Image: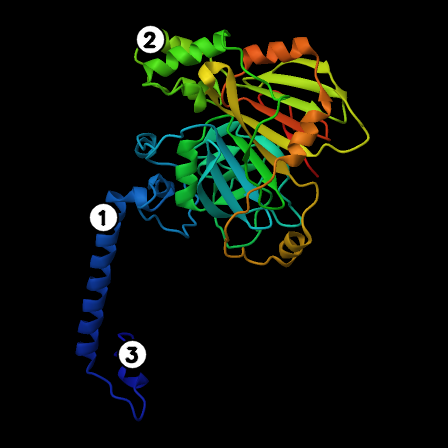
């Protein structure tokens, strides 16, 4: 190939030099070609700017956005994302469970596993906290308030101090500053499915919900306003009660009732959260992220651990006289295998068939707690699907505060 900048004096022995006029012509053709390509690329870039910057996150699963996009430009076309709709609707309460050892997120709908994906959690110097959380805020386009305005698209905050789920680089090992990074397509899908209030559990090992029955679990009051509201709203939506999808009023307001009256009633159906602390010997109740009341409780053999268990009310049964419960029991300590894998930063092992967990420890914890009868009745009147009961040896995390559900640290 000829170099346009060569002169006859630069031609050395053993090389072939073209005449100067020919070299100049070749250089001109090359310059014209480069200019034409540049103009074409500029035109294409203007016409398709949404694919070059942040709006590439508006792709829905099945479409392919650039996986290693590094630009930090702000959103330029939010309408495309605003009009995107999820492919399906949850059948019941959603639960997000994250295993640090496996670097994996599992999504459960109504107690059934519906999706999972690899994640990247915090490094040893910036660990991801363990415990019980919930989604307290959501933003499509968010920039970090701590780390140089780093982009955190499809952000779902679980603490006000800076821990969130969001789209990001997932290299197959812990690599974040404490957040839970998700693959882009999965982050988009999850963002559209969840609501403010969706439960998030972070544990060392892989855990999962299992159905549980126990005489000490709360039972709904069939004649309560909550049950009547759920029944009316359920009829107006084709027989499915909207509270099964409703972690907060924000969720119920997204339902499409058959009448304005039914819609107004559905908005009143707000799940409650109950927390029993062995450390404090107290029971706390919150609704819509707001404290309602707290009372002392008696715990048998208070010096012995109860463990940490998250119970979730799934759906009404027997015409509202009962409710189906599930429970996730969180191990107190990580297994030796998972602890070693985390320290070595081993890639997640190939997923095998899940063993069915036992509710024995959760049942044992329930049997040791004595709650005043008037408190039981008060809770029964408020109980709806998506309500939860957390039992733990720990007290409330300092992260629990205004506009949060109960946050319980397990380490």
- Residue identifier under label 3: 6
Q: In this view, does 346 lie to the left or right of 59?
A: right
State whether residue 279 appears in this view: yes
276 or 322, nearer to the observer = 322
Mark 3 neighbour class, 10 Å CA radius: few under 14, some 14 to 19, many 20 or more: some
From the viewer's perspective, is the residue at label 1 or at label 2 nearer? 2
Position of residue 244 relative to residue 129, above or below, is above
Quarter of the image with the N terminus is bottom left
Residue for point 51% across, 43% down = 105
Q: Which mark is residue 43?
A: 1
Residue for point 47% across, 38% down = 107
Q: What distance separates the C-alpha of mark 1 from that of mark 2?
A: 49 Å
Mark 1 neighbour class, 10 Å CA radius: few under 14, some 14 to 19, many 20 or more: few
Mark 2 neighbour class, 10 Å CA radius: few under 14, some 14 to 19, many 20 or more: few
Q: Position of residue 132 (x, y in %)?
A: 61, 33
Label tally: 3
Quarter assignment of residue 305:
top right
From the viewer's perspective, is the residue at label 3 or at label 1 nearer? 1
- Residue identifier under label 2: 260
Q: Mark 1: which secondary structure?
A: helix
Position of residue 10 relative to residue 247, above or below, is below
Q: Position of residue 325 (x, y in %)?
A: 54, 27
Q: Mark 3: which secondary structure?
A: loop
For marks 2 and 3 on the same chain, the one whose residue lies earlier in the sequence: 3
Q: In this view, does 145 lie to the left or right of 194?
A: right
For marks 3 and 1 on the same chain, the one whose residue lies earlier in the sequence: 3
Q: Position of residue 42 (x, y in %)?
A: 26, 50
State whether residue 396 appears in this view: no
257 or 224, nearer to the observer = 224
Residue for point 71% across, 14% down = 295
For marks 1 and 2 on the same chain, the one whose residue lies earlier in the sequence: 1
């Amino acid at each position: 190939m000829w170099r346009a900048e060569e002169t006859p004096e630069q031609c050395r022995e053993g090389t072939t030099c073209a005449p100067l006029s020919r070299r100049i012509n070749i250089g001109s053709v090359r310059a014209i070609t480069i200019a034409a390509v540049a103009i074409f690329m500029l035109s294409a870039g203007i016409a398709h700017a949404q694919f070059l910057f942040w709006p590439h996150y508006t792709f829905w699963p099945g479409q392919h956005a650039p996986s290693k996009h590094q630009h930090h430009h702000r959103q330029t076309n939010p309408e495309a994302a605003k009009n995107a709709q999820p492919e399906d609707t949850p059948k019941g309460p959603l639960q997000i469970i994250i295993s640090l050892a496996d670097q994996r997120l599992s999504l459960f709908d109504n107690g059934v596993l519906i999706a999972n994906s690899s994640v990247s959690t915090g490094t040893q110097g910036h660990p991801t906290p363990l415990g019980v959380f919930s989604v307290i805020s959501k933003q499509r386009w968010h920039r970090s308030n701590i780390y140089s305005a780093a982009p955190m698209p499809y952000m779902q905050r679980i603490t006000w101090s800076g821990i969130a789920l969001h789209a990001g680089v997932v290299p197959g090992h812990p690599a974040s500053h404490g957040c839970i990074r998700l693959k882009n397509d999965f982050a988009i899908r999850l963002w559209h499915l969840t609501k403010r209030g969706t439960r998030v559990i972070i544990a060392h090992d892989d855990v999962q919900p299992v159905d549980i029955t126990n005489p000490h679990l709360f039972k709904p009051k069939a004649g309560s306003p909550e049950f009547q509201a759920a029944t009316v709203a359920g009829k107006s939506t084709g027989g499915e009660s909207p509270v099964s999808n409703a972690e907060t009023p924000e969720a119920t307001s997204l339902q499409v009732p058959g009448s304005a009256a039914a819609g107004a009633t559905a908005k009143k159906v707000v799940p409650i959260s109950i927390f029993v602390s062995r450390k404090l010997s107290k029971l706390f109740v919150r609704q819509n992220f707001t404290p309602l009341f707290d009372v002392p409780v008696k715990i048998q053999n208070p010096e012995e651990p109860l463990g940490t268990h998250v119970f979730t009310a799934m759906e009404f049964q027997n015409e509202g006289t009962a409710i189906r419960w599930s429970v996730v029991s969180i191990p107190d300590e990580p297994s030796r295998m998972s602890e070693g894998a985390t320290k070595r930063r081993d890639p997640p092992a190939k997923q095998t068939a899940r063993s069915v967990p036992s509710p024995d420890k959760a049942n044992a914890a329930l049997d040791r707690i004595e709650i005043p009868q008037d408190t039981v009745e008060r809770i029964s009147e408020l109980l709806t699907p998506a309500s939860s009961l957390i039992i733990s040896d720990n007290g409330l995390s300092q992260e629990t505060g205004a506009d949060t559900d109960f946050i319980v640290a397990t380490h």
